[in-house]
Amino acid sequence: MSVAFRRLLSAASVAAVVLSVTPAVSQVPQRGLPSRNLLSRFGLERAWSNQSTINIRSDVVLHVVADEEVVIVQTRSGMITVFDAQSGVKLWDGQLARADQYSFPAVTNGDLLFVVIGSTVYARDKFGGQELWTLRLPNVPSTSPTVDDRRMYVGMLQGDVYAFDLPTIARNQAEGRLPQFNYENIVWHYGTSGRIVTAPVTDGKVVCFANALGSLYAVSTSQRDLKFQFETRGRASAPMDMATAVENGIDVSFIFLAAGDTNLYCLRSTNGTTRWLHVTGAPIREKPHVIGNSVYLVPLDSGVYDLDINTGRQRWWAPSVTAFVAATPTRVFGTDKSGDLAVIDRGDGALLGTLPMLGFPIRVANERTDRMYLCSTSGLVTCLREEGAELPIYHRFPERRPILPLFGDQPMTEAADESGATPEERRQLETGAEALPQDAP
């Protein structure tokens, strides 16, 4: 099934949910969740809740990740459960690993789900769970893979990064040539002198990775030509991010690197020059989260900072937050020092209140959409959203948002006029409002 056709089906299903206003998953109150009235005080509602497949007596949740289309729960025993991100419907589940065999967090592209378990990559259909191929890696991996629609990049303990061609792997699998012809799947590999400590990041033109000796490498995706090497006084201390921003009227890809010297570097992907750096004075263990024109930075025990993506200038600081959870056009949500969900004004960083969510300590740091995904240790997943926001806002890849039919003119919601929202988020809010029928509640 093509990506375009699947998104058309996704758009149709979203429209059906909006028109019927019938939840796909039961809205019966769940233990440990805030009441409907309490959520409403903060302009929130529960979109759905559903239970992962898990033996609650002997198993615990290990990873929860999400993209625009699915939410993935992985357990210590190797069980994986995949939910539809919009409706909460359980799409599939399965046992991918032996009990207590370590697995990295799953990653996805448009159609596939990838999990590295031990030294093996397992690829499954993201929506149906069908096993597509299994690939034995040439060395021991040290990171999750990074994938797009054509390539997979994996960092290794020995300091290498391998680039694999996904269509070649699929063809070799169809022809029964795996695992004997694994070498044919490798486009290139690049060796460094230290263990790769962060998953590679790529914009399709260059791929960047950092090793344990404090070196950041940027090589071309096609021929592994070294574009630049950047040295810091301490190795990368958190996963990197890569995003596009405008500089001198031109879209430029920037790398956001948190280093052991307590600095956050914003580097140009073309030549490695520093656009800006932000000195925190505290270790950075959490990935910097780029949403719109903001970089949300959470140094250890030091609150969350909203930095301007173009200058690195601090817009505001919320000292009570210890982890980023999600952002809407008007709010930022994070975990506070008590383990509750902090509600922050996106415009000025003011603390608007907290929601008791101690029963859901596992939280997706969602920089892809405006949804909040929270999970209990026993595998109960819940999704929170702003009231009436049936259509999610796509932060990172707005072009992937389903195109819905318009039902007539309707004014933009009030939230779009408040401070903090980017023009793209306002456009998505306006499009979502127009897509609703005029008599929709």
Image (cartoon, rainbow, N blue to C red):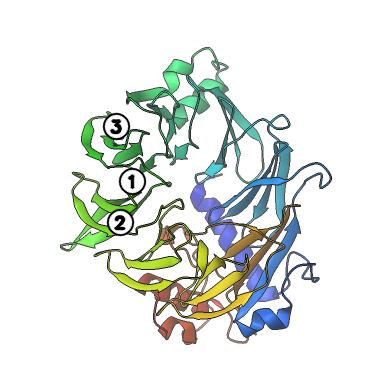
Which sits earlier in the primary sequence, circle 2 or circle 1?
A: 1
Q: What element carries label 3?
A: loop
Q: Does 264 appear above or below 132?
A: below
Which sits earlier in the primary sequence, circle 1 or circle 3?
A: 1
Q: Where is residue 14 in the image (x, y as percent from the top left)?
A: 61, 66
Q: Where is residue 429 in the image (x, y as percent from the top left)?
A: 47, 76
Task: Spot the residue most to the top.
Answer: 180
Q: Mark 2 points at which residue?
A: 244
In the rendering, which numbered label is found on residue 203? 1
Task: Spot the residue most to the right.
Answer: 57
Q: Quadrant of the N terminus?
A: top right
Please tell me how crowded label 3 is: few (under 14), some (14-19), or many (20+) other residues with Cα within 10 Å: some
Q: Is residue 104 left or right of residue 185?
A: right
Q: Is residue 343 left or right of residue 26?
A: left
Q: Nearer the viewer, residue 75 or 358?
A: 358
Q: Mark 3 points at which residue?
A: 222
Q: Does 312 appear above or below 268?
A: below
Q: Nearer the viewer, residue 377 or 84?
A: 377
Which image quadrant for residue 104? top right
Task: Tell me the amino acid under the disc marked 2.
Answer: Thr
Please tell me how crowded label 2 is: few (under 14), some (14-19), or many (20+) other residues with Cα within 10 Å: some
Q: Which residue is drawn at 62% across and 64% down?
A: 339
Q: Distance between the residues labelled 3 and 2?
A: 20 Å
